[in-house]
Amino acid sequence: MAEAQGQAPPDEEVLVAPERGSVEELLDASAGDPLDPMRHSAAHVMAEAVMDLFPGTKLGIGPAIADGFYYDFELPRALTPDDLAAIETRMASSVAADHAFVRHELPPEEGRAFFVERGQPYKVEILDDLGVAARAAGLPMPPVTTYEHGPFIDLCRGPHVASTGRIGPFRLLSVAGAYWRGDEKRPMLQRIYGTVWATREELEHYLWRREEAKKRDHRRLGVKLDLYSFHDVSPGSAFWHPKGQRLWRTLEGAMRELQERRGYQEISTPIVVHEKLWRQSGHWDLYRDSMFLIESEGQTFSLKPMNCPESTLIYRSRVRSYRDLPLRLSEYGRLHRNERSGTLSGLTRVRHFIQDDAHVYVRPDQLGDEIEAMLGEVAESYSWFGLQPRFSFATKPDKALGDPALWEKAEGLIREALDRSGAKYAVKPRDGTFYAPKIDIYIDDGLGREWQTATIQVDLVMLPERFDLEYIDEEGRPQRPVAIHRAIYGSLERFIGILTEHFAGAFPFWCAPVQAVVVPIADRHLDAAAELAGVLRARGLRVEVDDSSNRMQNKIRLAQEQKVPYMLVLGDREVEARTASPRTRGGEQQAAVDWEELAERLAEESAARRPD
Ligand SMILES: [Zn+2]
Ligand SMILES: [Zn+2]
């Protein structure tokens, strides 16, 4: 059950449903950052400015979020970018006035009357829900706390900075529609996003990062580089164009080569699977809502959301001896999960995806070595991209299946393997899955954003117990194996989305969809261009010829825009001497080199799988 979906990056433009719904969450203004009190204070100051510019505004909520804050407003009209500038100006004068934040406590009835009188129905609704929750828990209604600064007072739990003067450099970023409490049956409010930092430099860096992230957005780059596209006939499922498919197959091929070297055996199992298998694995109870169901001949099937249980049918197809283990079964299975269409985003949040999945069956005494070897697989494959994996070790959750002694043993072995590998890791107590402690692997991309990619899960229960797996030990007695679920890229779709943004489309030479473009200067060089491409393709290189009628400078510019690593220009001199002068996408002009020698050199470079 390798979980490789993770969170999509925030996308304000399409965000219509805030993640906050419950009354507790509505009042919780923090995002877990030391800057939260300042960021939330900036939200209050923004609300003050909006109330001032638009009298009668009704206030929703205004929490701190990662990198900033927002506030939801019901306003008489739609906001424009000019409004944001005006709101910023008012905010700046409130900051300059250095108003103190003052906390007040009111008896419940008085507090409610205060917000009724001020015409703030959303605040009254929050208070009423708090009353309902308190009564349900048999508790008295708590006092109403407010924070006041200058002319503005808000229902709030805090904390705040001491005064508005403590608010650092800020910028309002965008406006988006947001349903009250994330409910599309409730009013749509206008949400203003802002960012605020302790220093001017941090603000500038954040704004740069944000612009850069827009430029690198894989949804945009995917179209520009002709890699993939999305169509409404299949939401959350990429259509792979020839170049994207080439990138895909190169990544898959590299992993397949590593796996074969490590003794994995590849399997392939059906996509449409009877419900009884999911009942046995436990997914029917836990995952049914995320499964696509299909009726046929009065029976219920589903598109598989994961590969795990099917691999046990292959395990059980014959008697396994202790000598057969570890049995490493890898599978590039097509998986479908019925994510809500509103949550889908590019390649990072999809309905259809393929994992570089594997289920490895081991004897308990083999577990430590196998995990250590898998950590080596992660280190090797991430080095192809120059990515530094970070590890976190998630231990037994409160609700766990299986024998506690076995859990303890498995956790000890994982810890030992992590220590032996020399990898630095963080421990996340009680964060394992209900059937397995796990190692999650994270990377930081070129913009410092964290992504979870790979996972290694040590399964003591779901596959071994529920599918009654056995092997025969040295004494001829049946024993229970341990199953390890592992994925290194995770979802290939997601991994390619991350790589596209990390490299801003300039993939390393070894996996670039087009590794070189041959650029003939004139039509009389076309035959030689085709011949050179043939020499390079014979060495397994991915090469195109630009045989268009464009002028040479245009051909080079186009290849650079497509982030092709090498351009090979052919003119009279080169054709005569059977040489080519490689020019890199970075603009470096290399010395002319003989065709065969060039093919040799590029093939070696490609096989080395190095980041550029
Ligand atoms: Zn699995
Ligand atoms: Zn507050």
Image: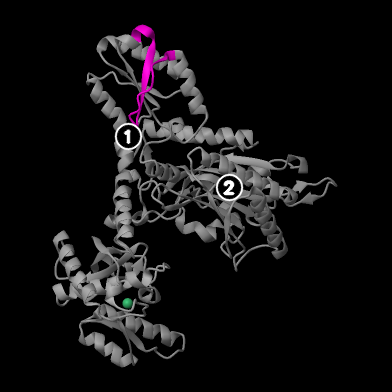
Q: Residues within 10 Å of mark 2 (few under 14, many from 20)?
A: many
Q: Give the amino acid type for the residue marked by disc 1 in the picture.
A: Asp
From the viewer's perspective, is 297 left or right of 12?
right
* Residue 141: percent from left, percent from top: 39, 89
The magenta span reads 575-595
Question: Circle 1 is placed at which residue position?
Answer: 226
SS label for mark 2: strand
From the viewer's perspective, is 404 left or right of 447?
right
Task: Give the label on residue 486, or none.
Answer: 2
390 w.r.t. 434: above or below: above
Quadrant in the rendering for residue 192: bottom left
From the viewer's perspective, is 551 left or right of 431?
left
> Is ligand 1 within 8 Å of the beta carbon of the residue shown at mark 2?
no
From the viewer's perspective, is 554 left or right of 544?
left
Q: Residue at x 61, y 62 (%)?
A: 395
Residue 82 shows up from this direction: yes
Q: Residue furthest top?
A: 576
Q: Give the amino acid type for the residue marked by disc 2 in the picture.
A: Arg
121 w.r.t. 253: above or below: below
* Nearer to us in this view, 207 or 157: 207
Q: Residue at x 49, y 27 (%)?
A: 605
